[in-house]
Amino acid sequence: MEPLRPSRAPWRAVIVILGGVLAACAGEGRAPGPAPQAAMASPARSAEAAPPAAAGAATTIEGVARNAKAGAVVLTAGGEPVYVQGLDAWPRDVDGKTVVATGRLVDKKLIPDPVGPDGELRQGAVGTQRVLEQPAWRVKP
C-alpha cells in the first residue's frame, strides 16, 4: 500500500486568494497620494457628542479625566475627547475621576495626519481635535 500524502489543493487555493488580495492592495490605477479618508478610522462628531458651546467660545465642560497619547483629555458624556492644553497627563489621583474644566474651546490640528510625505501610513489622526485652551479644572466632588 502506498503512504497517504497530504493534498496540495488547499494550499493552492490559499495562494490564489492571497495573490488576489495582494494584487488588490497594490493599488494599480490609483494616483499616488494619501489613502482615502474613508479607509482611516476617524471619529465623526455628532451633535450629541459635541460639547455644549460653540468652538472658540469660553465654556465649561464636564467629563472623565483620561490620558491619551497626545495629552490629557476630558471625555465628555458623548464620548468625545477634549484635549486640555498644556497638560501632558492627569495626576495619578485625578485620572479616571469626573472633572469640570473651564476655558476657550477651539478646533485645531494637534495630532499629525496619519499619512507621511511619501504616502506611507503612520500613527496620527485625520482632521482637527477639540482643545480647551487656557484651562482651569477641578475634580468634581
Image (cartoon, rainbow, N blue to C red):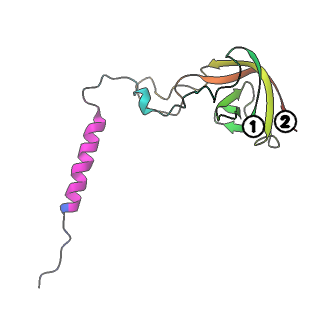
Q: Nearer the viewer, residue 67 or 141?
A: 141
User: What is the quadrant of the N terminus in the image?
Assistant: bottom left
What secondary structure characterizes most of the magenta part?
Answer: helix
Question: Compared with residue 56, is residue 140 higher up or lower down, i.e. above or below?
Answer: below
Q: Position of residue 54 (x, y in %)?
A: 68, 17
Q: Residue furthest top?
A: 56
Residue 65 circle label: 1
* Crowd band around label 2 with a 10 angstrom C-alpha radius: few (<14), some (14–19), many (20+): some
The amino acid type of the residue labelled 1 equals Ala
Q: Position of residue 29 (x, y in %)?
A: 24, 26
Q: Which residue is mark 2?
A: 139
Q: Residue furthest front?
A: 48
Q: Quadrant of residue 136?
A: top right
Going from the N terminus, do you reach mark 1 or mark 2 first?
A: 1
User: Would residue 103 be counted in the magenta stretch?
Assistant: no
Question: Compared with residue 18, is residue 37 higher up or lower down, i.e. above or below?
Answer: above
Q: Nearer the viewer, residue 107 or 19?
A: 107
Q: Which residues are magenta?
A: 10-28
Q: Position of residue 61 (x, y in %)?
A: 76, 27
Task: Indicate left or right for 60 with 33 as reference.
Answer: right
The amino acid type of the residue labelled 2 equals Val
Q: Quadrant of residue 94?
A: top right
- What residue sits 24% from the left and 49% below the top? 17
- What residue sits 28% from the left and 42% below the top? 22
Question: Compared with residue 132, is residue 18 higher up or lower down, i.e. above or below?
Answer: below
Q: Nearer the viewer, residue 79 or 14?
A: 79
Q: Residue furthest bottom?
A: 1
Q: Decide: marks 1, 2 in contact (CB < 8 A)?
A: yes
Q: Nearer the viewer, residue 13 or 42?
A: 42
Residue 1 circle label: none
